[in-house]
Amino acid sequence: MTQKIRISLAEMKNDQEGKVVFIIGGRGMKTRLEALGIRRGVKILKLSSFLGGGPVVVSVGTGEVAIGYGMSRNIIVEVEMDESSFSG
Protein backbone atom coordinates (compact mmCIF):
# COMPACT_ATOMS: atom_id res chain seq x y z
CA MET A 1 0.00 0.00 0.00
CA THR A 2 1.28 3.46 -0.80
CA GLN A 3 0.84 6.77 0.94
CA LYS A 4 1.33 10.28 -0.43
CA ILE A 5 3.63 12.53 1.56
CA ARG A 6 5.02 16.00 1.03
CA ILE A 7 8.77 16.55 1.16
CA SER A 8 11.22 19.01 -0.30
CA LEU A 9 12.89 18.30 -3.62
CA ALA A 10 16.20 18.10 -1.73
CA GLU A 11 14.81 15.21 0.36
CA MET A 12 13.66 13.16 -2.63
CA LYS A 13 15.66 10.09 -3.56
CA ASN A 14 17.38 9.82 -6.93
CA ASP A 15 15.04 8.43 -9.63
CA GLN A 16 11.99 9.36 -7.55
CA GLU A 17 9.07 11.10 -9.22
CA GLY A 18 6.76 13.63 -7.63
CA LYS A 19 4.39 16.50 -8.28
CA VAL A 20 5.19 20.06 -7.25
CA VAL A 21 2.55 21.19 -4.74
CA PHE A 22 3.99 24.56 -3.76
CA ILE A 23 7.07 26.72 -3.77
CA ILE A 24 8.27 28.64 -0.73
CA GLY A 25 9.74 31.92 -1.90
CA GLY A 26 9.17 35.31 -3.37
CA ARG A 27 8.07 36.36 -6.81
CA GLY A 28 11.63 36.39 -8.18
CA MET A 29 12.31 32.80 -7.19
CA LYS A 30 8.96 31.58 -8.48
CA THR A 31 9.49 33.40 -11.78
CA ARG A 32 12.96 31.86 -12.16
CA LEU A 33 11.63 28.37 -11.49
CA GLU A 34 8.70 28.87 -13.88
CA ALA A 35 11.20 29.83 -16.59
CA LEU A 36 12.83 26.42 -15.98
CA GLY A 37 9.44 24.69 -16.26
CA ILE A 38 9.01 24.12 -12.52
CA ARG A 39 5.63 25.29 -11.28
CA ARG A 40 2.78 24.02 -9.17
CA GLY A 41 1.17 20.86 -10.55
CA VAL A 42 4.14 19.81 -12.70
CA LYS A 43 5.56 16.30 -12.41
CA ILE A 44 9.31 16.14 -11.93
CA LEU A 45 11.83 13.33 -11.69
CA LYS A 46 14.89 13.77 -9.49
CA LEU A 47 17.87 12.49 -11.44
CA SER A 48 20.74 13.21 -9.09
CA SER A 49 22.14 15.36 -6.34
CA PHE A 50 25.54 15.86 -4.81
CA LEU A 51 26.57 15.29 -1.23
CA GLY A 52 27.31 18.38 0.76
CA GLY A 53 24.62 20.57 -0.76
CA GLY A 54 25.55 20.71 -4.44
CA PRO A 55 23.04 21.17 -7.26
CA VAL A 56 20.01 18.93 -7.70
CA VAL A 57 19.36 17.74 -11.27
CA VAL A 58 15.75 17.09 -12.26
CA SER A 59 13.87 16.13 -15.39
CA VAL A 60 10.96 18.44 -16.19
CA GLY A 61 8.91 17.90 -19.32
CA THR A 62 11.40 17.11 -22.09
CA GLY A 63 14.42 18.76 -20.47
CA GLU A 64 16.79 18.51 -17.55
CA VAL A 65 17.69 21.37 -15.21
CA ALA A 66 20.07 21.84 -12.30
CA ILE A 67 18.79 23.71 -9.26
CA GLY A 68 20.85 24.94 -6.35
CA TYR A 69 20.50 22.95 -3.14
CA GLY A 70 19.09 25.90 -1.18
CA MET A 71 16.41 26.51 -3.78
CA SER A 72 15.56 22.81 -3.97
CA ARG A 73 14.77 22.86 -0.23
CA ASN A 74 11.99 25.37 -0.97
CA ILE A 75 10.26 23.26 -3.63
CA ILE A 76 7.68 21.05 -1.93
CA VAL A 77 6.80 17.89 -3.80
CA GLU A 78 4.15 15.23 -3.22
CA VAL A 79 5.54 11.72 -3.62
CA GLU A 80 4.20 8.24 -3.14
CA MET A 81 5.92 6.23 -0.44
CA ASP A 82 5.51 2.54 0.15
CA GLU A 83 4.42 1.90 3.73
CA SER A 84 7.39 -0.45 4.14
CA SER A 85 9.61 2.66 3.80
CA PHE A 86 8.30 3.98 7.11
CA SER A 87 9.82 2.70 10.32
CA GLY A 88 7.84 2.20 13.46
Image (cartoon, rainbow, N blue to C red):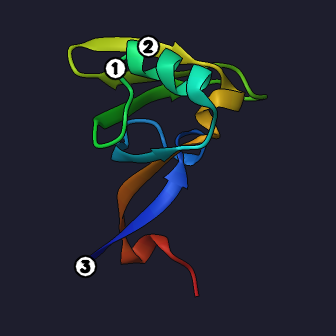
- Residue 22 locus on image (x, y percent): 46, 47
Cβ atoms at labels 3 and 2 below 8 Å apart? no
Quarter of the image that includes the C terminus: bottom right
Please give the residue where the numbered disc 3 appears in the rendered image.
Answer: 1
Q: Residue at x 78, y 28 (%)?
A: 52
Residue type of the residue flagged with mark 2: Val
With respect to residue 74, does 69 lie above or below? above
| Disc number lying in front (3 or 2) | 2
Cβ atoms at labels 1 and 2 below 8 Å apart? yes
SS for dot 3: loop
Please give the residue where the numbered disc 2 appears in the rendered image.
Answer: 65
Please give the residue where the numbered disc 1 appears in the rendered image.
Answer: 37
Q: In the orientation shown, which residue stands out farthest toward the left?
A: 62
Residue type of the residue flagged with mark 3: Met
- 25 on left or right of 14: right
- 29 on left or right of 31: right
With respect to residue 72, does 28 lie above or below? above
Q: Which of the 4 image quarters holds residue 74? A: top right
